[in-house]
């Protein structure tokens, strides 16, 4: 492979890296909280490792050496463009969650609402209910975000919810009481919901059998 093709491959890798890095930085900046943004960083490293494994493999095959150089260059440049973009975004004040206070997450942390599903509720029923009440489509078409007012979602496994599947929600203090009541009522009236608790840590909820 001549020098011009090598340069072209490296430039192609740079262009791809800038595109991928930009998308990852956008996801990092628009995450609802810092602990969620961590998943973007993990995703970036997973992508980098994948490219670093595939690139050298393609280099060993004559017909795919150009693609191998592109992927190898991309593997090197993606972390560089990502961290440079993150740093620039933070300096420009574009990282939405940067100045938010740290939030504790866990079953021992008080939640605005705790929802227990009825025994036998399947994953499809859970997804349909939560998609209709907790999420909305993003304006850019890239998946979904929580509806306004939902700050933290914590999934509860049966060992954390007296044998039920469920979740805990922390709502934004600025959320109107009418909206809170409407959300609570919507869950409470669902045919797949067993019970809704308010303003309590999941670990502090007494066994439903004992409370009856």
Image (cartoon, grey):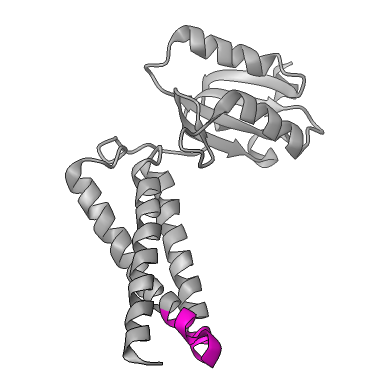
- Percent from the top left, x then y, of residue 76? 35, 74
Dividing the picture into quarters, in which one does residue 103 lie? top left
Query: Which residue corresponds to the image point at 60% horizontal and 19% vertical from the top-left?
Result: 197
Residue 79 vertical position relative to residue 146 in the rendered view, above or below: below
Residue 206 in view of the camera: no
Q: Is residue 167 left or right of residue 87?
A: right
- The one nearer the camera, 211 or 83, is 83
Outermost residue, top direction? 178
Tell me: residue 19, above or below residue 62: above
Query: In this picture, which residue range is highlighted in magenta?
Result: 56-69
Residue 150: give x, y in percent of width and height. Answer: 47, 26
Q: Quadrant of the C terminus?
A: top right
Most prominent secondary structure in the magenta stretch? Answer: helix
Q: Horizontally, is 87 left or right of 58 in the view?
A: left
Q: List x then y, in percent, for residue 5.
A: 37, 84
**Residue 117 in view in this figure:** yes
Quarter of the rendering occupied by the N terminus:
bottom left
In the displayed structure, does residue 13 sit left or right of residue 123?
left
Query: Residue 172 is drawn in which quadrant?
Result: top left
Given residues 125 and 202, the one toward you in this image is 125
The reply to whether the magenta stretch includes residue 2 is no
Vertical arrangement, residue 130 with respect to residue 211, above or below = below
Residue at coordinates 45% horizontally, 83% vertically from top-left? Answer: 66
Residue ID at (56%, 32%) = 203
């Amino acid at each position: 492979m001549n020098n011009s093709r090598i340069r072209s491959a490296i430039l192609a890798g740079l262009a791809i890296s800038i595109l991928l890095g930009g998308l990852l930085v956008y996801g990092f900046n628009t995450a609802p909280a810092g602990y969620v943004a961590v998943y973007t960083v993990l995703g970036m490293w997973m992508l980098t490792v994948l490219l670093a494994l595939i690139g050298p493999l393609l280099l060993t095959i004559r017909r795919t050496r150009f693609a191998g150089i592109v992927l190898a260059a991309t593997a090197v440049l993606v972390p560089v463009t990502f961290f440079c973009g993150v740093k620039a975004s933070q300096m420009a004040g574009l990282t939405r969650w940067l100045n938010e206070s740290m939030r504790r997450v866990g079953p021992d942390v008080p939640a605005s609402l705790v929802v227990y599903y009825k025994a036998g509720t399947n994953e499809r029923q859970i997804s349909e209910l939560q998609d209709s009440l907790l999420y909305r489509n993003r304006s850019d078409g890239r998946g979904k975000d929580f509806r306004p007012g939902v700050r933290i979602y914590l999934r509860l496994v049966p060992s954390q919810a007296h044998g039920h599947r469920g979740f805990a929600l922390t709502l934004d203090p600025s959320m109107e009481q009418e909206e809170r009541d409407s959300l609570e009522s919507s869950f409470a009236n669902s045919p797949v919901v067993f019970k809704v608790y308010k303003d309590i840590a999941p670990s502090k909820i007494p066994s439903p059998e004992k409370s009856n």
